[in-house]
Amino acid sequence: MQVTTDQFKRCNLVTVTGRIDSNTTPQLFKVFDSIIAENRFKIVFDMGGVEFISSAGLRVLINTQKTCKRWNRGELVLANVTQKIYQVMDLAGFISMFKFYDSVVEAVGNF
Amino acid sequence: MKISYTRIFPGRFDSLAHIAEFVIQAAECAGLDDRETYALQLAVDEACSNIIQHAYGGEDQGEIECTYHITDTGLTVMLRDYGRPFDPSAIPDPEMPTDLDTCTGGGLGLYFMRQLMDEVHFEFTPDSGNILTMTKRKETD
């Protein structure tokens, strides 16, 4: 799993390529945690390069969303989610927990 | 036609990517499509993560023996470990979350396995270990 982060004026962008499984999830959690630790709660997660995400990875997204949305201070939004991953999120009942965007530009424009 | 192959992986989280490669290759040989292959990969990943975390109680406590059987109708994956057995019937499917506050994101592993595979069977024996057998059938045209 490779992670890159960018900071924009109104939000932060996290881009991941590769697998998000029980081995790599702690690394992803740290990335979100370090952004939140800087009091930045508006995050775009570009999942276009994510080949695979397990329930452990989905749990990180749910927990990050909870932290970001607390006191209406922000939100985690998802961009470029592949159909296979979208179907698994649907199976878990997670679709209504996130906004989905077809591009990073649209997702960043949300904030 | 029946092809079988077995590999043993250390019970560590960094084995998960190697186990995925192993079963993806098998799925391709079995003629599963992209969606079926992803479903298989997810079910196997959840099963192996559970073995490491719950059966062995952590990394480097034991091995995971992974066997696949390719048949004319699809693919069967068998996972064997020698960790703690459990009662799968005692683990209910998670409730569908209605809002973020009550959503825990927990309990999805076994639920994904049950939902994504055509057959899921657990066997716990003192001598032969814990054996999980999961079958994914090819969609017929």
Image (cartoon, grey):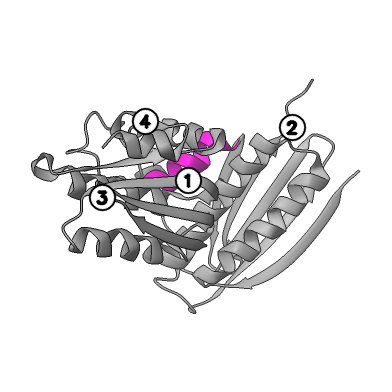
| Type of amino acid at the residue the image marks with label 2 | Lys
Highlighted range, magenta: B106-117
Query: Residue A3 versus residue A24: which sits nearer the camera?
Result: A3
How far is disc 1 from disc 3 in space, using C-alphas? 21 Å
> Farthest bottom residue?
B60
Which residue carries the number 4 mark? A95
Q: Nearer the viewer, mark 4 or mark 3?
A: 3
| Type of amino acid at the residue the image marks with label 3 | Lys
How far is disc 4 from disc 2 in space, using C-alphas? 27 Å
The chain letter for the residue carrying disc 1 is A
Above or below, B15 relative to A7: below
Q: Is residue B75 found left or right of B9 in the rendered image? A: right
Q: Answer few, some or many: residues within 10 Å of disc 2's Cα (few below 14, many 20 plus, some between 14 and 19).
A: some
Query: Residue B77 versus residue A82: which sits nearer the camera?
Result: A82
- On the image, the x and y values in percent for residue B84 come to 43, 66
Q: Answer few, some or many: residues within 10 Å of disc 1's Cα (few below 14, many 20 plus, some between 14 and 19).
A: many
The chain letter for the residue carrying disc 2 is B
- Residue depicted at 37% across the width and 36% down the height: A107
Q: Are marks 2 and 1 on the same chain?
A: no
Which residue carries the number 1 mark? A47
